[in-house]
Image (tube, rainbow, N blue to C red):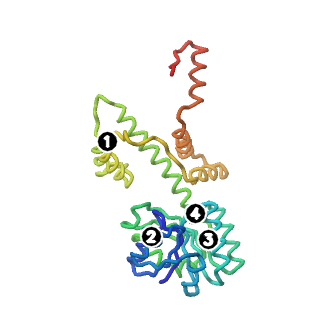
Amino acid sequence: MKIGFVGLGKMGGNMVERLLRHGHEVVVYDLSEELRKSLAKKGAEPSASLENLIAKLRPPRSVWVMVPAGRPTEETINSLASLMEKNDTIIDGGNSYYKDSVRRAAELRKKDIYFIDAGTSGGVWGLTVGYCLMIGGEEKAFKALEPVFQALAPKDGYLRAGSNGTGHFVKMVHNGIEYAMLQAYGEGFEVMEAKKEFNLSLEGISHLWNQGSVIRSWILELAENTFKKSPHLKDIRGFVADSGEGRWTVAEAINENVPAPVITLALLERFRSRQKESFSAKVIAALRNEFGGHAVAKK
């Protein structure tokens, strides 16, 4: 089928290429002319603007949006909505907040435009192994786009979770779990790295644990690759960003009275990683010196 695609970054560009490999026609747009030309060489049909993209699609049109969450997504969807017609469909494959997706679906429904929120996981490896798609939206719109989902995902790799918002809600929780998993692996490897007298091979242990261990995973495969490149990660700064979904997961847990201490602490540890030096740690050190005469390390 023929589909429009907006946003040709690391994820979007690979998704377009995977669609092309599966025989779909893809009309692409990105602010970067270089990215548009790059995908054109691989078989995509480039467009110079959103207006131009819509003009190249036959009704009922479908356009997949793969731009950063927040304002870029909001502006892109609003612009597309002003150009599209009844029975057209907008798919948001980014990491949008699920409540925004519920709102956007309601707004587009007034114009008889379908909306699908498609939580997408797979990263830069998705081109090769496929993308896990967590989908929310009306059954009719989902069925119409199923050939696209089948092309992007591996076997059993896509699911309509329910009505609008459910796709991005499930992806939000997925990323919250990811925070906790990464934190656990990070702490475990730090304990082993600290045990200097054993001179442990973190690459070898990563490989070992993937051979039947109960903690084997794709993340451990990536850990093995990482330690192969840099056994002690000396060239990497311990600064960990967050896309917002960990925060949303924790907020949702609080709203639903669900205890989620591991995910919450994993999120807080990401905040800690951005501090050059912890002021709270300075306070604690000073207070220990005051009440117990404990030594204070000086700069």
Does label 3 or label 2 sit earlier along the sequence?
A: 2
Residue 231, numbered circle? 1
Residue 168, numbered circle? 4
Outermost residue on the top side: it is 293
* Residue 243 in sight in this render: yes
Three-letter amino acid code of the residue under disc 4: His
In whole angstroms, how far apart are the C-alphas of marks 2 and 4?
18 Å
The relative height of residue 19 versus residue 221 in the rendered view (above or below) is below
Q: Residue at x 61, y 74 (%)?
A: 115
In whole angstroms, how far apart are the C-alphas of marks 2 and 1?
32 Å
Query: Callout 4: few (<14), some (14-19), or many (20+) C-alpha neighbours within 10 Å?
Result: many
Q: Position of residue 57 (x, y in %)?
A: 54, 84
SS class of the residue under badge 3?
Answer: loop
Q: Nearer the viewer, mark 3 or mark 1?
A: 1
In whole angstroms, how far apart are the C-alphas of marks 3 and 4?
11 Å
**Residue position for label 3:** 163
User: Residue 272 falls in which quadrant of the image?
Assistant: top right
Outermost residue on the right side: it is 110
Q: Mark 3–mark 1 contact, CB under 8 Å?
A: no
Residue 15, numbered circle? 2
In whole angstroms, how far apart are the C-alphas of marks 3 and 2?
24 Å
Query: Callout 3: few (<14), some (14-19), or many (20+) C-alpha neighbours within 10 Å?
Result: some
